[in-house]
Image (cartoon, rainbow, N blue to C red):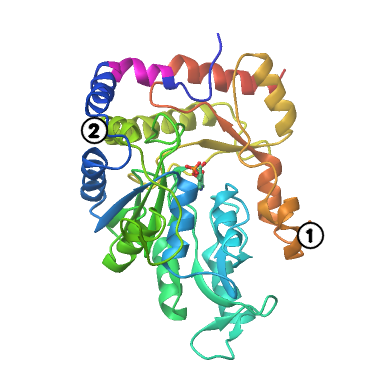
Amino acid sequence: MTIPILDLKAQYRKIQGEVRTAIDEILESQQFILGPVVEKFEAEVASYLKAGTAVGVASGTDALLLSLMALGIGPGDAVLVPPFTFFASVSCITRLGATPIFIDIDPENFLIDYRAAESFLGERARPHPGGHGLMDPKSQCRIKAILPVHLFGQNCSMAALIALAQKHNLYIVEDVAQAFGARAEIAPGNSKPAGTLGDLGCFSFFPTKNLGGLGDGGMVVTGRTDLAEAVRRLRVHGADHKYHHLEVGLNSRLDALQAAVLRVKLRYIDQWCEERIERSRRYQSLFLATGLVGRQILSLPDPGDGQSHVFNQYVIRASRRDELRAYLSGQGIMTGVYYPVPLHLQPCFAFLGHRQGDFPHAERAAAEVLALPMFPELTREQQEIVVQSIQDFYRP
Ligand SMILES: Cc1ncc(COP(=O)(O)O)c(C=O)c1O
């Protein structure tokens, strides 16, 4: 039996009728770019997230880029970001001529370590000579924003990051590409949807995400009408009305076909997140029974409370990771490594002058992480096979 890391066909089989009807409606209308179906989807996402405004764009990458553009971030500015994330969380910064300041991750959860951010801002950053705010002593750039990434579906410590941003007058741009449906606790018993706590939240509808389309798609959500207007303008070449360009933007619109399918899938998102959470609990109890956990062999993700982690990926740390991965592949079990090279060591960011050893937690994570099969339709039997095979590998 082959166990895929994600089984989109199983999901499609369940909603095939609804998806086809939605696509047919678009084909009948022949309205493919933006238009009423995209507007409906934007309104539904805004209402689901209880966010002010949602703006559909062409991808999660563009959601990040357009958000930073809307904030006016560019050359001479710096943004705090973790080095252990998908490439786009950082490329959106350098694409605009701004400078990423890497903040190492918390080894417990792979997320930006707010204590490391706090000590950077409190101890290493300097007052900007132009007044108002802080400067990165290395690049001499003005520190403008924090870009936390809710990696694998798990919320960052937003209350602490918001307090830091307020103290140092920084924007927060949330990378929520992997965490649609997650909730962040801001005070005991009080949580809000991930992506609605910062100035802007950036979602991806790449097919493998919890809410995934039939291709690329993304969304920016914000409670600020000025930023929503800026993103709306920037996604259509910076035009406030047709052929009148206030600034140079992008061509980055959500297709009506994507919106139509995503409207169907949005109706299932809570159920799918719940099913992912339930499967994470099942992995947890199966793994604990193996006796491999916590003995420098395996460590498991924190299951979180409520919807604080919606398990877009179920990522463990494993000793002899690459050998284990090859063994599982031989057993027909597909796994993933997100991400094998931390971003401060990527050739294209060599100009930032970082070296091996600069961000040890990110580097260790890159060597140890393994994403196991995780999707709402994953069966108990499949999970038992995954865990049994891992046990067989370590105790032949
Ligand atoms: C953390 C993170 N940020 C940004 C992106 C970019 O999204 P997209 O692939 O839709 O451009 C992704 C998705 O691949 C992601 O996982």
User: What's under tag 2, amino acid-wise?
Assistant: Arg
Boundaries of the magenta span: 9-16
Q: Please, what secondary structure does the residue beneath circle 1 have?
A: loop
Place of residue 209 in the rendered image (x, y in percent of width and height, measured from the top left): 44, 36
Mark 2, residue position: 267
Place of residue 90 in the rendered image (x, y in percent of width and height, measured from the top left): 58, 56
> Residue 74 falls in which quadrant of the image?
bottom right
Residue depicted at x 67% and y 36%: 297
The quarter of the picture where the C terminus appears is top right
Place of residue 189 in the rendered image (x, y in percent of width and height, measured from the top left): 27, 57
For residue 273, the mark is none
Q: Is residue 31 left or right of residue 105?
A: left
Q: Is residue 2 above or below residue 187?
A: above
Q: Are marks 1 and 2 in contact (CB under 8 Å)?
A: no
Q: Is residue 168 left or right of residue 13?
A: right
Q: Is residue 111 left or right of residue 236?
A: right
Residue depicted at x 29% and y 52%: 54
User: What's under tag 1, amino acid-wise?
Assistant: Arg
Mark 1, residue position: 355
Q: CA distance from mark 1 to mark 2?
A: 46 Å
The extreme top residue here reads 1
Q: Is residue 356 magenta?
A: no
The earlier-in-sequence mark between 1 and 2 is: 2
